[in-house]
Image: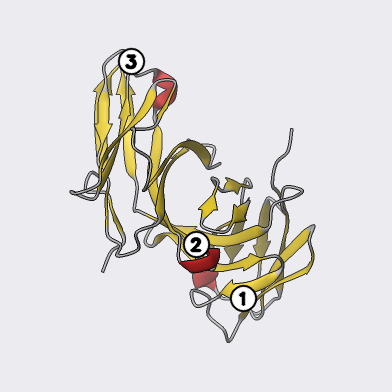
């Protein structure tokens, strides 16, 4: 079973508009973390935002916010005021906590390619 | 500016040759990951280490791949013998993980491997 599911292979958004990239996850571990990474065409993986399973509030980092709905097991990334430089692949990832921190591997989704247009 | 350093950035090799990729994690990070990225499979976790000990290498083909951390400043991923299907971008990432908390993993720029 897929641990992380990103159902949108590609998305278009106009500059200055907001866009939501979907991510659902599957885990029975009560302790986990959710991450979003950006991969521009240059290839590097850039960390964007993190949400812990026990966090009460949705994470925000500048123009990025994470719409965390625990009961639905979703962790959608919202990018506000899109810029041309936001065009990239976006990956959702999950770290399962495990006991004593013995787990913690990061599992990635298949990614969503976002294209920001003028 | 702390960063994960991977070498080489690009590698072209002939089928059957040995390939060694190196990674210098961020100083103080206790967890190191190796990922492989292909168009078909996306990002696959090959192996990861905590405090230099391998925790999980189930994603790695054991017959030809090996991963080690000879010391805290160096992680290596070796393929012997290499095959064309190993062509991919190999990422190393490091993180600080303490108990059940943890931070984001910082990625190196990757090694683009082409096996011909």
Residue at mark 3: chain: A
Which residue, given by chain and number where applicable, does mark 3 sit on?
Answer: A81
* Residue B92 in sight in this render: no
The image's mark for residue A105 is 2
Q: Nearer the viewer, residue A83 or A81?
A: A81
Residue at mark 2: chain: A
* Residue B79 in sight in this render: yes
Q: Is residue A12 left or right of residue B42?
A: left
Residues at discs 2 and 3 both on one chain? yes
Which residue, given by chain and number where applicable, does mark 1 sit on?
Answer: B82
Colour scheme shown: secondary structure
Residue at mark 1: chain: B
| Image coordinates for residue B29, horizontal then vertical, percent | 69, 52
Front tag of 2 and 3: 2
Above/below status of B39 relative to A44? below
SS of the residue under disc 3 = loop
The image's mark for residue A78 is none
């Amino acid at each position: 079973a897929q641990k992380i599911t990103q159902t949108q292979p590609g998305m278009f958004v106009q500059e200055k508009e907001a866009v939501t990239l979907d991510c659902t996850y599957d885990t029975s571990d009560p302790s986990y973390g959710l991450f979003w990474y950006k991969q521009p065409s240059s290839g590097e993986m850039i960390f964007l935002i993190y949400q812990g399973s026990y966090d009460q509030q949705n994470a925000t980092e500048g123009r990025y916010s994470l719409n965390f709905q625990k009961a639905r097991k979703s962790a959608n990334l919202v990018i506000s005021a899109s810029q041309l430089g936001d065009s990239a692949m976006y990956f959702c990832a999950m770290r399962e906590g495990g006991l004593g921190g013995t787990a913690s591997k990061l599992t990635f989704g298949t990614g969503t390619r976002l294209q920001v247009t003028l | 500016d702390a960063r994960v350093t991977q070498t080489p950035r690009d590698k072209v090799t002939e089928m059957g040759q040995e390939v060694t990729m190196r990674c210098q994690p961020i100083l103080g990070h206790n967890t190191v990951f190796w990922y492989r990225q292909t168009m078909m499979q996306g990002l696959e976790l090959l192996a990861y280490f905590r405090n230099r000990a391998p925790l999980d290498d189930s994603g790695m083909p054991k017959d030809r791949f090996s991963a080690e951390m000879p010391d805290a400043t160096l992680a290596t991923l070796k393929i012997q013998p290499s095959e064309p299907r190993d062509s991919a971008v190999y990422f190393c990432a490091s993180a600080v993980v303490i108990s059940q908390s943890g931070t984001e993993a910082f990625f190196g720029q990757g090694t683009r491997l082409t096996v011909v």
